[in-house]
Image (tube, helix red, strand yellow):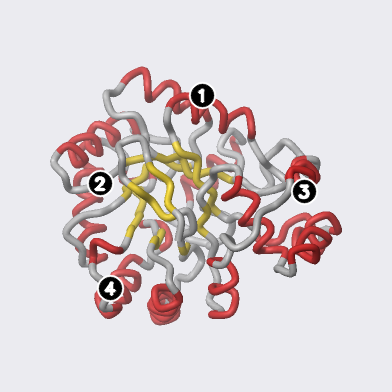
Amino acid sequence: MEYITLNNGVQMPKVGFGVFQVDDLAACEKAVAEAIDVGYRHIDTAVSYRNEEAVGAAIAKSGVPRDELFVTTKAYIHQMGYEKTLAAFDESLEKLGLDYLDLYLVHMPFGDYYGAWRAMEELYCAGRVRAIGVSNFGADRIVDLARNFEVVPAVDQLELHPFYQREDEISVLSGLGVAPECWAPFAEGLNGMFDNPVLAAIASAHSVSVAQVVLRWNVQRGVPVIPKSVHRERMEQNLDVFGFELTADEMAAIAALDLGRPQMFDPRDPAEVARVYDYMENPVLTTLQ
């Protein structure tokens, strides 16, 4: 495994394992247990995924020392605000069965995330979480946070894939010392990603899968990824992206696929904002990373 060093010196694996949409607790526990057995050491969950208990159970049974694992979870919109976020953190720790978190994120740029960030700074300074960050925050929101708080987010989890590459935003984040991290790196197969002729040709040239090419592309441009699969063979493939390197021409060919707009979730679309607010009352698991 290769690691990225966050802005506070903490090291985070470049490839993690996500559990979005694995809401069956038994299936989730099995998938996480298998992922850890395969070699994943970064597990990413969230309150809104409704499976923190299963993640914690798999970790407890894995036999892997706690300090070898990197565990991320996220506070959702209804948990924003200083007091609410402090309580949310304790609730997540209890469900996960852990004494500390490696990374705690504000899941959405909505609600009282200023109050939430004050709470997260306090948790970080108390040593209860090793790093704090955000998810789905545009670069403009990151600049705003950085100007108003002492602790700059270590990570911003974003929609980042060949059809939405966000190079300008990544450049802004880099200038602030914030690491971009990719959720849903395969965009759930939208736009025919797995059949794309450019990606397929590159995969063939390296004798790897299209999925491995997509992951390698993000990792190679400095973006950690958190793919999800409940199939062991794909788990193994998704982790095996460090044995080959894309050429400059291949990176350029992938760059040309960029459509320049969100394909899965747009936090600036009023209808999308309403949908994510409604999620906890009507938890239909669609595209909600």
Name the residue tied to disc 3: 250
Q: Of the residues tagged 2 and 1, which is closer to the observer?
A: 2
Q: Residue 157 appears at what percent x and percent y?
A: 48, 44
Q: Secondary structure at mark 1?
A: helix
Q: Residue at x 42, y 52 (%)?
A: 3
Q: Of the residues tagged 4 and 1, which is closer to the observer?
A: 4
Q: Of the residues tagged 3 and 4, which is closer to the observer?
A: 3
In three-dimensional space, the C-alpha distance between marks 4 and 2, rounded to whole angstroms, equals 19 Å
Q: Residue at x 54, y 61 (%)?
A: 227
In three-dimensional space, the C-alpha distance between marks 2 and 3, rounded to whole angstroms, equals 36 Å
Q: Of the residues tagged 1 and 3, which is closer to the observer?
A: 3
Q: Nearer the viewer, residue 222 or 85?
A: 222
Name the residue tied to disc 4: 64
Do the residues bearing badges 2 and 3 touch, measured as CB atoms within 8 Å?
A: no
In the rendered structure, which amino acid carries the disc numbered 1?
A: Asp
Q: Secondary structure at mark 3?
A: helix
In three-dimensional space, the C-alpha distance between marks 2 and 1, rounded to whole angstroms, equals 25 Å
In three-dimensional space, the C-alpha distance between marks 3 and 4, rounded to whole angstroms, equals 37 Å
In the rendered structure, which amino acid carries the disc numbered 3?
A: Glu
In three-dimensional space, the C-alpha distance between marks 1 and 3, rounded to whole angstroms, equals 30 Å
Numbered badge on residue 130:
2
